[in-house]
Amino acid sequence: MLPSYTVENYLKALLQAQIGLRSEDLVPMGRLAAALGVVPGTATTMVKTLAESGLVRYEPYVGVRLTPAGEKLAAMVLRRHRLIELFLVKVMGMSWTEVHDEAEHLEHAVSERLIERIDEMLGRPAVDPHGDPIPDPEGTVDRREYDTLLTCPLRARVAVSRVTDQDTSFLRFVERHDLKPGSVVEVEERDEAADSVRLRSENDREITIGARAASKVLVRAIQIAVLCLLLPVGAAAQVPTPPASTPPIGVPPDSSAPFTILDNSFLVEEAFNQERGIFQNIFGFHRDNGAWAFAFTQEWPFHSQQHQLSYTLPFSGVAGQRGFGDVMLNYRYQALTEDPGLPAFSPRLSLILPTGGTDFTYNSVGLQGNLPVSKQHGDTYFHANAGLTWYPRADAQPGISGSERVSLVTPHISGSAIYRLRPMFNLMLESVLQFEQFANPDGTKDRDAIFTFSPGARGGWNLGDQQLILGAAFPVTWVESDSSAGILLYLSYELPFRR
C-alpha cells in the first residue's frame, strides 16, 4: 500500500504517541483518535487497514503499535515535517508560531530528494524551531528524556529545550513569557492550591504560569562545568623573560626567531612549563548568553622547569545565581622541549575537588588529563590538545538529597594557530570540541557535542624581569543546533619569586 495523506498522518500520530511508552506498550485507540481529531470508530477502521499492510500491530480492545516498517515510514514523515518547519523559519522568515500548519500540508508533497537538499542547506540540524528532534535519514529519532517545568528541581537553572504544544496561541503565550527554546529560567515556587508555577527568567523577570502550560515546556539542567572548562588550566600561561635583543614592539621579528609571548592562550593549552624562579598569575573572564565564569590560576615551577604545580579557583554565575566552583590542583610534566625537529610536549593531570556551591558542582572528586603539543613554524605557532574529564560519582541532580550517583566522562580535543603580527602582539584562532556527558534526573546519561570557535588577540609589555599580557577573544559556541556568542577577557602577570 502506497502511503497516502491519511496513512502518513496516522503513522506520524502513532509515533508521537509511542514516545514515553515502554517498548511493549500499546497506544489506546481513544488516545490515537483524540490526537487525530476523529471518533474512535473511524480510527479503528483505518488501524485495521494499516495492520493488514504490516505497518502496525493491532490488538482489539487493547490498542495499537507501529511495526518496525511502520515506525521507519512514520519517522520519515516526521523528518519532512520538522525540516520544513525549520526551513520556513530560517529561510522564508516565517514566525515559529505559524509554521506547524503549513508543514502539515507540505510534508506530504515534497520529495525525499528535496528534503535532503533542505537538510544539507540548513547544516544538518538536530532540532526544529520548537526544539523537537529531527529524525536522521535512517529514521532514527533522538528519544532523550526531559524534565518539565513541573518536575525539574526548584531553584536550579534550567534551559528550555522543547515546547510540546504546537498550537499557535500557545506558542505565542510561550513567546510572551520568555520560554522559547534556549531561554534560561529558574523555577522558584510551585503552588498546588493555585495550580501555578512561579519562574524567574535570565533577565530577572518574574513569571507565573499555570501548571498545564508548565507541563508542556520541557527543560534540561544547565551544566555550569561547561563554562568553567572554557577557562581551563591550559590557559594558565608561562612567558619566559625575553632576551635583551628583543626588537621594539613596532618592528616585525625575523620569522625564525623564538616567540616573545608563549603559553598565554585562552582555551587551548600550550606545552610550556614555567621557567625556574618565575611564577605567574592568570585571570580569565568569560561571559556567554547571560552566564559568566571567572577563574584565577597561579603556576609555580617545582625544583626545575620540568615540573610545574598550579591551582585554579573558579567562580561562576547564571540566572541570578553565583558561587564558588570546584578547585583544581594541577601537575604538568615537561616531557619534551621544542627543537627544530621536535615539538614541545607537556602532559597534565588535575585533581578536581568538590568545593563548589550546589549550583556549581557535581559534588564529586574528579580527574582531568590533557596532552598538549606545540610547534612553531615561522611566524605561526600551532597547538593541539586531547584529553578528558572524569567524575566517578557525580550527582545526577546536584543539591537534591538522595540523588543517584553516576560516572561522567567528557573527552575533548582542541587546536589553535597563533600568528605573530609584532613581537609583542599576536592574532589567535582557537577551537575546542568536547563531548559532554551529563545525567538525566532518572540517572540515565546523555551526551552533547559542544564546539567553540574563538578568534582573538593578545599583546603585552616586558617590564624589566616582569611581563604583563592582556588579551580578548569572541568565542562562538554551538551545542547541537543552538549557538551563542560571548566575550573572553584575559590578564597575565608574571614575575620572579627569587632573584
Image (cartoon, helix red, strand yellow):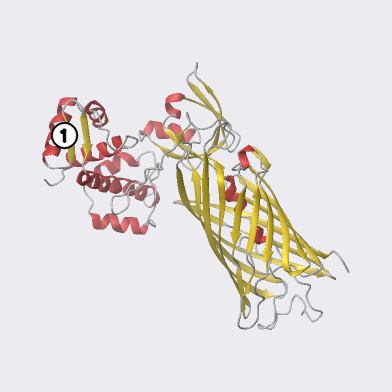
In the displayed orientation, state which residue is furthest to the top: 193
Task: Tell me the residue that label 1 is attached to.
Answer: 47
Q: Foreground residue, 343 or 483?
A: 343
Residue 318 appears anywhere in the view: no
Q: Residue at x 56, y 61 (%)?
A: 387
Disc 1 secondary structure class: helix
Q: Residue at x 60, y 83 (%)?
A: 341
Left or right, 63 with respect to 458, comes to: left
Which percent across, then down, holds residue 313? 71, 50
Q: Residue at x 37, y 48 (%)?
A: 86
Number of numbered discs overlaid on the protein picture: 1
Give how far across and how far down residue 384 sits, in percent.
Answer: 57, 68
Left or right: 90 as drawn, with respect to 295: left
> Which quadrant: the N terminus?
top left
Residue 102 drawn above or below residue 245? above
Q: Residue at x 23, y 26 (%)?
A: 30
Q: State left or right for residue 301 relative to residue 399.
A: right
As displayed, is residue 58 above or below residue 89?
Answer: above
Where in the figure is residue 336, as x and y percent of width and height? 65, 74
- Neighbor class of circle 1 (other Cα within 10 Å; few <14, some 14-19, many 20+) is many
Q: Is residue 499 visible?
A: yes
Type of amino acid at the residue the image marks with label 1: Val
Q: Position of residue 127 (x, y in %)?
A: 39, 47
